[in-house]
Image: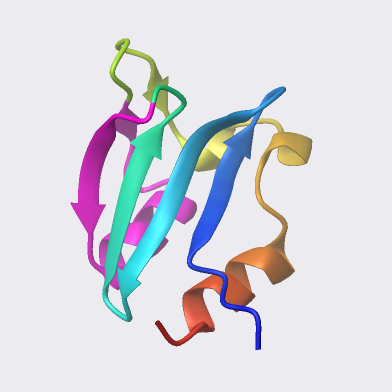
Amino acid sequence: MNKRNVLGLINYEGDCLRAKKKSMNEYVIKDQHGVKLVTWNLNEFCDFLDGKLEITDSHGKIWNYQREHYESRAKIMELVLFINEIV
């Protein structure tokens, strides 16, 4: 089985935000510069995906997942596999 513990969440000619799954309930979000922005639990991560939480990158840009262009966001099946992967 091929583990998927890293996923690009928003991509405009490269990942703008990337998530790394550290455990079943711990997700580290980094920006395009490799700067660690936050560590979220599963509920917080899902709140971000639902647009309830925003994140500010290391250059001050505020990201709201639901406001980003649909084509730039991770595909639903990728998110499902990522969230359900055992680390």
Q: In this view, does 80 lie above or below 1?
A: above
Instruction: State the residue in front, 16 or 72.
Output: 16
Magenta range: 34-56
In magenta stretch: residue 20: no
Q: Residue furthest right?
A: 71
Q: Is residue 36 above or below residue 78?
A: above
Q: In this view, does 23 lie to the left or right of 68?
A: left
> What is the quadrant of residue 69 in the picture?
top right
Residue 48, position as x, y percentages in the image: 39, 50
Instruction: State the residue in front, 57 or 2.
Output: 2
Residue 55, position as x, y percentages in the image: 31, 33
Residue depicted at x 30% and y 53%: 28
Residue depicted at x 31% and y 61%: 27
In magenta stretch: residue 44: yes
Residue 78, position as x, y percentages in the image: 68, 66
Image quarter hosting the N terminus: bottom right
> What is the quadrant of residue 13 in the picture?
top right
Residue depicted at x 30% and y 68%: 22
